[in-house]
Amino acid sequence: MNFAGCKDNRNCNSIQLEATWEPTSDNTLAQMNTWNRTKMVGTASLNSKGNVALSMWVNLRNGVSAENLHDSFEWWEFILGDFKDFLSE
């Protein structure tokens, strides 16, 4: 989890959830582009070492309820599972 838009290490306006996987020969830029083109939430990428990364930004600006934040984390869990399935196709 990365925090962004913080003032004095407080009052951050967003967080980025991110997961990475070791590269395999099956992971390609075209595969990541397919995910990004066909999915509404979660951004897939390959880093310079070929590691696969999935990230999702969560808006905290102007406050967010505990229920909303919990819902965002549930979305993240669903997206992680969907992405793992996508990688194994």
Image (cartoon, helix red, strand yellow):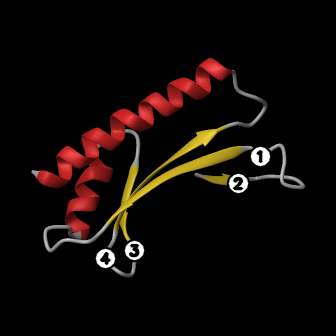
Residue that extends furthest to the right in the rendered view of this protein: 8
Crowding at dot 1, Cα within 10 Å, few <14 / some 14-19 / many 20+, comes out as some
Q: Outermost residue, bottom direction?
A: 48
Q: Amino acid at mark 1?
A: Cys
Q: Which residue is mark 2?
A: 4
**Whether label 4 touches label 2, CB < 8 Å:** no
Where's residue 69, x and y in %? 60, 28
Query: Residue at left 40%, top 46%?
Result: 42
Residues at marks 4 and 2, CA–CA distance in whole angstroms: 25 Å
Give the alpha-carbon distance from disc 3 to disc 2, as whole Å.
20 Å
* Dot placed on the residue nearer the N-terminal end, 3 or 2: 2
Q: Mark 4–mark 3 contact, CB under 8 Å?
A: yes
Q: Image point 59% across, 40% down: which residue?
A: 58
Query: Left or right of 70: which side holds 44?
Result: left
Mark 1 or mark 4, which has the lower sequence index?
1
Give me the residue at 60% from left, 22% from top: 68
Verify CB contact (< 8 Å) between mark 3 and mark 1: no
Question: Mark 3 or 1 closer to N-term?
Answer: 1
Q: CA distance from mark 1 to mark 4?
A: 30 Å
Q: Looking at the image, which residue sits at the far left?
A: 89
Q: Which residue is mark 1?
A: 12
Q: Which residue is mark 3?
A: 47
Q: Which mark is first along the chain, 2 or 4?
A: 2
